[in-house]
Image (tube, rainbow, N blue to C red):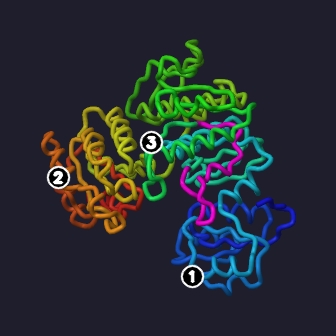
């Protein structure tokens, strides 16, 4: 759909309380549009933010909410046919678009678009890129599927030339089944890694490769593809680019590489080389080799954008990470509690290895809830065992809504525990409730490190545990 944003005054958002939709609503309001919307179970913090922005929100869905009809309707990813507001939009032939389409038409258009993509690490990497640009005085705009702690919000309208987007490969809406990042008009793409994920919409790794290939094919010939050269799938897909290819990673053939990596409890330091010549030394409060690679991608991107090493360093040193990305919840009686969004075996392993690097002599507990469409499937069962074996003690929860996965395809958390116990790693299955808190309280000791991992809220167990101990 070709829109003329100047001709639009009123915009209605169906499912306005989703994280991305709320951010979009705020950006549209800030730009002077009349904004209203609806959702089910309207509650804080989204309802509070929308009220503060003076955006009217209807509780529940009703076709009467679209009278008088708006100039444009944005339909959220969670909506489908049968929703009364979706039905009246189609029946009355009201103009409608998806969130990524709206982001592209109203905000990315006219900017230099930096899209951070890949199966893992894109939220942290896009947040880091936005923060480094911010500290360098570039005043970027951004739209990120998380809350960067340095900004305290997932979106920003800056006055600078650059727009940073987290390039999600998930689909856009029931009527727009292509990946979200295909709408983002990329000038520069950071591609970290490509693995199988999102089993609810992709049937195979090959289907995911097609989506990323399409993103690569959208970069103009004067644009830049920044590829992690440690990932074989990324290398394969990158060979088809028409843009300027820049590589990063630990691979000897990469353009941007890291050497002399060292860590203490507070920071990671490393030397950065470009074409085997030293570029600079960087220090960051991020941990793990995967985070060093994320940093390399950002350094290479900032170099393309004209920044010198001195302009980048402060952003890396002062970066506070992203909420629910290895977020430190607190410490009680010498026990440290962290919370993370990890749900794929690669993410679990690299996150645990990062903590192991940071606290090499302390007992590490991994508490994992299989919740996503992919993590509840047995295809990754052996890889979950390998990933969780980095820890000293493991707790798994029962599958979240197991009925969503056919019985013959379901992950067995009991089998994972059995295989870990065979490796002399104490493991058990516990429900995320008071029983889990009681068990941890009885078995944790001073200097232990506990990592909770789930793409849900884990029944607020991390915060509750700190209060109990």
Location of the C terminus by quadrant is: bottom left
Q: Is residue 271 magenta?
A: no
Identify residue for label 2: 443
Q: Which of the pair 65/357 is nearer the observer?
A: 65
Secondary structure state at the residue bearing disc 2: helix
Residue ranking furthest to the top: 277
- Name above or below for residue 86 compared with residue 129: below
18 lies left or right of 133: left
Instruction: Work out whether residue 219 or residue 446 is closer to the camera in this orientation and state it.
Output: 219
User: Label 2, label 3: how many angstroms apart (C-alpha)?
Assistant: 36 Å
Q: For this view, does 314 lie left or right of residue 426?
A: right
* Residue 36 vs residue 170, the one in the foreground: 170
Magenta stretch, residue numbers: 169-190
Mark toward the start of the polypeptide (2 vs 3)? 3
Secondary structure state at the residue bearing disc 3:
loop
Query: Of marks 1 and 3, which one's residue comes earlier in the chain?
Result: 1
Can you give x and y, in whole percent of width and height, for residue 359 in the image?
Answer: 31, 35
C-alpha span from label 1 to label 3: 37 Å
Name which residue lies at 68% across and 87% down.
64
**Closer mark to the observer between disc 1 and disc 3:** 3
Q: Secondary structure at mark 1?
A: loop
Asked if one can make out residue 320 in the rendered structure from this viewpoint, the answer is no
What is the number of the mark on residue 60? 1
Please rate how many residues cluster around mark 2, counting C-alpha atoms within 10 Å: few if below 14, some from 14 to 19, many from 20.
few
Q: Determine which of the numbered discs, if any, sits on residue 122 in the image.
A: none
């Amino acid at each position: 759909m070709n829109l003329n944003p100047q001709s639009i005054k009123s915009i209605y958002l169906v499912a306005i309380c989703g994280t991305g939709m709320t951010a979009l609503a705020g950006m549209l309001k800030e730009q002077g549009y009349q904004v209203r919307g609806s959702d089910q179970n309207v509650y804080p913090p989204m309802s509070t933010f929308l009220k503060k922005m003076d955006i009217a929100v209807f509780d529940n869905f009703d076709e009467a909410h679209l009278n008088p009809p708006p100039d444009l309707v944005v339909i959220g990813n969670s909506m489908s046919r049968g929703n009364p507001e979706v039905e009246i939009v189609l029946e009355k032939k009201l103009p409608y678009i998806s969130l990524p389409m709206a982001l592209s038409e109203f905000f990315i258009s006219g900017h230099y678009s930096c899209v951070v993509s890949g199966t893992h690490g894109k939220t942290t990497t896009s947040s880091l890129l936005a923060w480094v640009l911010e500290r360098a005085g570039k005043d970027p705009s951004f739209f990120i599927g998380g809350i960067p702690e340095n900004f305290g919000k997932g979106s920003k309208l800056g006055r600078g030339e650059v727009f940073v987007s987290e390039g999600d490969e998930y689909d856009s809406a029931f009527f727009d089944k292509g990946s979200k990042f295909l709408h983002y008009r990329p000038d520069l793409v950071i591609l970290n890694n490509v693995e199988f994920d999102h089993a609810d919409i992709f049937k195979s790794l090959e289907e995911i490769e097609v989506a990323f290939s399409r993103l690569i094919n959208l970069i103009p010939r004067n644009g830049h593809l920044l590829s992690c050269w440690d990932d074989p799938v990324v290398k394969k897909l990158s060979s088809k680019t028409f843009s300027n290819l820049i590589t990063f990673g630990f691979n000897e053939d990469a353009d941007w590489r890291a050497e002399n990596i060292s860590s203490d409890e507070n920071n990671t330091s490393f030397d950065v080389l470009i074409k085997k010549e030293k570029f600079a030394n960087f220090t960051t409060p991020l941990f793990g080799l995967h985070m060093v690679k994320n940093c390399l991608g950002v350094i290479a991107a900032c170099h393309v954008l004209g920044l010198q090493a001195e302009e980048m360093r402060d952003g890396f040193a002062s970066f506070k990470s992203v909420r629910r990305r290895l977020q430190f919840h607190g410490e009680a009686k010498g026990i440290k509690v962290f919370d993370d969004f990890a749900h794929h075996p690669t993410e679990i392993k690299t996150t645990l290895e990062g903590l192991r690097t940071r606290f090499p002599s302390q007992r590490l507990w991994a508490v994992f809830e299989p919740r996503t469409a992919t993590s509840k499937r047995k295809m990754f069962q052996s890889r979950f065992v390998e990933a969780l074996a980095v820890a000293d003690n493991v707790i798994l929860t029962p599958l979240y809504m197991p009925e969503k996965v056919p019985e013959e395809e379901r992950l067995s958390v009991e089998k994972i525990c059995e295989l870990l116990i065979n490796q002399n790693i104490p493991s058990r299955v516990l429900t995320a409730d008071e029983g889990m808190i009681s068990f941890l309280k009885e078995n944790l000791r001073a200097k232990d490190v506990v990592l909770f991992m789930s793409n849900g809220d884990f029944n607020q167990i991390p915060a509750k545990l700190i209060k109990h101990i």
